[in-house]
Image: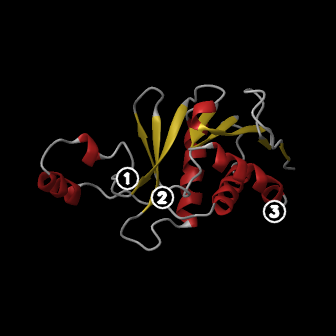
Amino acid sequence: MTTESFKPALIRDREQPEWQIDGRAIFIRPVTHMPRRADIRVEEQDSWLILGEQSRLREDERPAWVQANQLESAPLYRPGSVIPRAGQPPKLRMIIYDLEQQPICKPQWVKLALSAVLEYAYDHDLSCIQLPLPGYHYGGLTAQAALTLFRTAIREHSHKNPATIMLALPDEDLRQLLLSLLPEIADC
């Protein structure tokens, strides 16, 4: 049997999660208000690894034509897959975008990637992961669709690790929107 509970409130107790799914603590917070450091941080990425701050284009100071040639010969990562990266904390790139497709983000890719993230956390005995709301920032998924995909992935993942999942949001406005959606999402 699965159980869920939620507490839509202001952050009064940093250690009190906003949502519980099958015994897992789900924190829904702006990235600046996380209760603790995660074992691994998940980032959204596209199949060519060019989105976001960690892209190869921004890290490389070579001329653009050299970088473009390198990208053409670089491996194309399959949407729905994950790529581990070293760091403190370590990172996991969740491939959920394909810039050559329309739409660039499909719910089935988000679902596959979330499942892969949860399996990775279980296989590596991670107790706490931090991830963005998948598909929302670049992909055009609504907050409700992204949160529903997240909830579905958690409920379908039978392992109890990770015990804590922290949804890292860009701002308090998105947090308040998600908290307002929790009663509706929990009833699905």
| Mark sitting on residue 51 | 1
Q: Mark 3 highlights which residue? A: 188
Q: Earlier in the sequence, mark 3 or mark 1?
A: 1
Direction from residue 99 to residue 154 in the image, left or right: right
Q: CA distance from mark 3 to mark 1?
A: 32 Å
Nearer to us in this view, 107 or 120: 107
- Contact (Cβ within 8 Å) of mark 3 with mark 1: no
Numbered disc in front, either 3 or 1: 1
Instruction: Assign a secondary structure to mark 1.
Output: loop
Q: CA distance from mark 3 to mark 2?
A: 25 Å
Identity of the amino acid at label 1? Leu
How packed mark 1 is, by other alpha carbons closer than 10 Å (few <14, some 14-19, many 20 or more), is some
Q: Residue furthest bottom?
A: 102
Give residue 30's position: percent from left, percent from top.
61, 39
Numbered disc in front, either 3 or 2: 2
Q: Is residue 37 above or below residue 66?
A: above
Q: Name the image colouring.
A: secondary structure
How packed mark 3 is, by other alpha carbons closer than 10 Å (few <14, some 14-19, many 20 or more), is few
Residue 160, picture quadrant: top right
Residue in the picture at 38% in, 58% down = 47
Q: Earlier in the sequence, mark 2 or mark 1?
A: 1
Residue in the picture at 37% in, 52% down = 51
Q: Is residue 97 above or below residue 11?
A: below
Q: Mark 2 highlights which residue? A: 138
Identity of the amino acid at label 3? Cys
Q: Is residue 42 above or below residue 180?
A: above
Residue 41 seen in render? yes
Give residue 132's position: percent from left, percent from top.
56, 46
Residue in the picture at 81% in, 40% down = 9
